[in-house]
Image: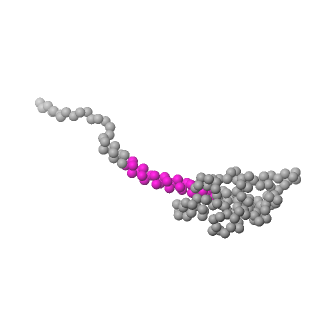
Amino acid sequence: MRVLIRPFRPERQRGFTLIELVVAAGILAVLAMGIIPVAKVASVRADEIELSRTLRTVRMAIDAYHEAAEAGEIDPDFIEPDHENYPPDLEALVDGVPGPRGPDGRAPVLRFLRRLPTDPMTGRADWMLRSYQDDPGRLSWGGQNVYDIRSASPRRALDGTLYRSW
């Protein structure tokens, strides 16, 4: 009869060895370093989409004001002749303008925006304005009316263009 003698081995401990933990932490660090730039680009891209949407909304409100003025739906006493039927400022789109007087002598208030949106690139509602009389490349506002708006951010977009040229 043969007796097998096994060498004494302590019971195996359950868990991870130090090397396994270091390797797992290294792999997680490499993955995290790859995700951070992607997350930053995604955040900038989301801000750019919001800027584009905000510019479109305000420009549509300016166009609606212009169309209402051209159609005579805004009280003629409110519109100044040298404004080319564009709003005098952005607050006129929010505060509203008087419509034509009805038979009872009262004028309805026409509003084109609920509130003045903030510029997602600056975090403030400090838009660069352009009047109808301004040169297209000029960055300062002439003050006659509001024909267009731009972002006041000096930064560049992901495609390399300046936000203020959008």
Front-most of residues 134 and 44: 134
Q: Quadrant of the C terminus?
A: bottom right
- Can you give x and y, in whole percent of width and height, for residue 161 in the image? 55, 64
Residue 21 is left or right of residue 9, and the answer is right
- Can you give x and y, in whole percent of width and height, for residue 1 in the image? 11, 30
Residue 127 is left or right of residue 86, and the answer is left
Magenta-highlighted residues: 27-55
Residue 58 picture quarter: bottom right
Is 115 inside the magenta-drawn segment? no
- Residue 126 visible in image: yes
Identified at 32% across, 37% down, the residue is 15
Identified at 42% across, 50% down, the residue is 32
- Please count the marks in the image: 0
- Can you give x and y, in whole percent of width and height, for residue 137 in the image? 63, 68
- Can you give x and y, in whole percent of width and height, for residue 39 in the image? 49, 52
Q: Residue furthest left?
A: 1
Front-most of residues 91 and 113: 91
Way the structure is coloured? one colour
Front-most of residues 73 and 134: 134
Identified at 71% across, 67% down, the residue is 133
- Main SS of the magenta part reads helix
Residue 122 picture quarter: bottom right
Residue 14 picture quarter: top left
Identified at 59% across, 52% down, the residue is 123
- Residue 71 visible in image: no
Residue 72 is left or right of residue 50, and the answer is right
Is 28 inside the magenta-drawn segment? yes
